[in-house]
Structures are given as structure tokens and as C-alpha cells.
Image (cartoon, coloured by chain):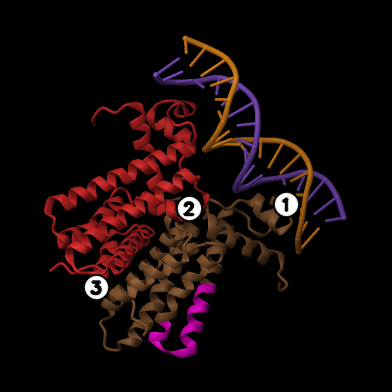
Chain colours: A red, B brown, C purple, D orange
Amino acid sequence: MMTMDRREAILAAARATAQAHGYGGLNFRDLAAEVGIKSASIHYYFPSKADLGAAVARRYWEDSEARLERLWGESQDPAACLGQYPSLFRKALENENRMCLSGFMAAEYDDLPEQVQAEVRTFGDIQVTWLAKVLSAAEPGADAVAVKQRARAIFAAVGGAQVIARSRADIAMYDDIIAGYRVSGLLPRND
Amino acid sequence: MMTMDRREAILAAARATAQAHGYGGLNFRDLAAEVGIKSASIHYYFPSKADLGAAVARRYWEDSEARLERLWGESQDPAACLGQYPSLFRKALENENRMCLSGFMAAEYDDLPEQVQAEVRTFGDIQVTWLAKVLSAAEPGADAVAVKQRARAIFAAVGGAQVIARSRADIAMYDDIIAGYRVSGLLPRND
DNA sequence: ACCTGAACACCGTTCAAGT
DNA sequence: ACCTGAACACCGTTCAAGT
């Protein structure tokens, strides 16, 4: 384990918890115990739960964006990128049946502080923008509106597959649903 | 408003709350206030929160099943049924940006009492079974495994569209994503 | 700069008591 | 049969105060 300052340790622990229990499931006492301080001390780093939630969600989309850009940068191959895309969401399930932080927070949306909501929206924007870029590269002449619609459809569908599979704690079901998207044509087939 | 006995009133209020705030967002005090009794009185009808949650989730899938069977019974027309299916999930969004109870509870899954988890699974089973029945009617010779895969894919994708649209409080986005499913072939086109 | 004790508000549950 | 006040144990959050 690499060295982490306390703020980073809190962020990492909070993220793991939020991916399993949502924003509502985040609590300072358990978090503090994990990090080895008292719950009140967390407020030194994050004044309120809203600040912590926003910081966690922001770091989450920053990491996701970096992963997506690395994936694109490695190959510049649209088919390979679209083929790999569902595996990014699969990783959360592999990690003790966790889910996409923003997927969970999208459900909790109405109960989130405004700052956290903004980060959740940014996560979605990044996913859709990246998918649209890749889809455009695959079909250079395609209509921009149609591409964005397709990008949103893929993002929503992959997120939905994750939630359903999570509720069965069944990664095979996730793979099956993704395979269904390929068969139906929502995702390109990878032969 | 039709007459409702108290138990039904509690169930209805709990359902509306759970569709907006999840199982975690349910609490006896607010619920009691809505119904016009004290929180302790709810325990007369539902011994524990787990019992209430399970009763709400069960009633939810019972109602959903009845709606699906009515839809199928009216036309026996697979294309019409598949065309209408997304509108059932749209209704929750129309109702003050609520979402499918089971979609929310699928996210909360790890924090649910076992009895509630069982009802959430039943909801999913009913959706997939109904979709498989309709898809089979549309393509009488189709392979049962492929049909079930397709049914799961549709269920997951429509649920995902609902969560994404909810996080933007934007029904037009829901319609757009569903349209994207039709264009890509996941859902049949309705011309 | 970093941490904490203590108070506060809230929640699910119980139970004896009311009508 | 149905309802309630009051109490209990517990938990997340806050903030003034410590070093």
C-alpha cells in the first residue's frame, strides 16, 4: 500500500463505502474508525458530509475520466474501446458487489446536497461525451444528435445492467445482459 | 379519493416515500404524520420496519404484475406490448420524479433485510418472465435462452434509462434514451 | 495544524396505559 | 380493536475547546 495522507485515506474509505451503501450509507463514525481517528476529526478535512460527498464524487469522475482517456489513447480503436467499456462497470461488481458511485447517487438524487448532485451530473456528462467521441470515430459521417442519443443509451443500459446484476450478486448475469446488448445491436458485436 | 383502511393508507404512503427516497429513507415518524397517527401505532399494523418494507415491495410487484397482465390481456399483441412497456416506467418519473421501487432497492440491496431482498428479486423475475413471454409470442420459434437474455437486457436497459433520467429530473431524456434503444434494435421500432 | 468531548437531533422499538 | 406518551438505546452531525 502506497503512502497516503489522511485526507486521501478518508477519501478512499468514503468512496468504497459509498459504492456499497450510497451517500446515505456514509457515516463519519465508521469512516473515522477505518482511518484511525475520531469522527469529529473528519470535519477538519471535510467541513460537512456534503463537502465529503462532493469531494468523493468529484474524485470518482476524475478517475473515471482518466481511465477512459487512457483506454482511448492506447488504441484509438473505436471497436476496441466500445468492447472494453462494459468491463469498466464490471470492475465495481468484482470489487465485493459494489456499484458505480454515480449510479447509486442517481437513485439517491433527490436527497443529495446540491454540490453532490452537480458532481453526479458531471460524471454522466463525461461518460456520454467519451462514448459520443468513440462512436463518432467509428462512424465518421454520423449525425451528431443520433450519436449522442446512442451514447446516452449505452451509458444508461450498462448502468442498468450493473444494478440488476448487483441485486443478484451475480456477475454472470451482468455478462449475460451485456451479451444481450451485443446481440440486439445496442453494443457492437466483438467477434 | 376512495376509502382506504389505515393499513392501506400506510402502505400507500410508504410506497410513495420509498419510490423517492428508498428503503433507507422510510421512517415511521414521517409516515405516521402523513397518515395522521403516531409512529408507535404503525407497529400495530407492521411489527418492524422490515415487515413494512417487505409488505410495500410485495404490493408493488403485485400491482406491477397486474398491470402487465392487463396490458397483455387487452391486445395479445407482442409489438403493442413491447411498445407500451417503457411507458410503465415512465409513469414513475411523471409522478414527481419518482422511480421504480425495485430499481431503488436494487441499489440499496446490501442494506436490505432478507425478507425485503426476496420481494425485490420477485419483482425482477416477474418483469423478465413477462417480457420473455411477449418476446416468444413475437418470435414463436426463438430459442428460450436467447429470449430470456433479451428479456433481461430490456428490463435492465429500461431501468437504467429511468435512473439516468431521474438524476436530471428530465423526462425528455428518458424518452430520448428509449428512442435510442429502438433505433439500435434493443426494442422494436414502432412506426 | 490537527484532534476530541460533549451536546444535539433523530430513529426504530418497546410497553404500559388509554379508549 | 386500535391508539398513544414516554422511555430506551443508538447513531450521525456539529462545534467549541483542546494540544
Q: Which residue is mark 3?
A: A185
Give the answer, above or below, for where A101 lies relative to B73.
Answer: above
Given the image, on which type of amino acid does mark 1 rest?
Lys
> Residue at 36% across / 42% down in the picture?
A58
Q: Secondary structure at mark 1?
A: loop
Q: Residues within 10 Å of mark 2 (few under 14, many from 20)?
A: many
Given the image, on which type of amino acid does mark 3 rest?
Gly
> Residue at 49% across / 63% down in the picture?
B99
Q: Chain of mark 3?
A: A
Q: Which residue is mark 1?
A: B38
User: How much space separates mark 3 and mark 1, taking CA atoms?
Assistant: 54 Å
- The x, y position of residue D16, in whole percent, is 60, 19
Q: Secondary structure at mark 2?
A: helix
The disc label shown at residue B103, or none: none
Left or right placement of residue C10 versus residue A99 in this view: right
Image quadrant in which the C terminus of chain B is located: bottom left
Q: Secondary structure at mark 3?
A: loop
Q: Quadrant of residue D2?
A: bottom right
Label 3 or label 2, whichever comes before in sequence order: 2
Give the answer, above or below, for where B7 lies relative to B110.
Answer: below
Marks 2 and 1: which is nearer the front?
A: 2
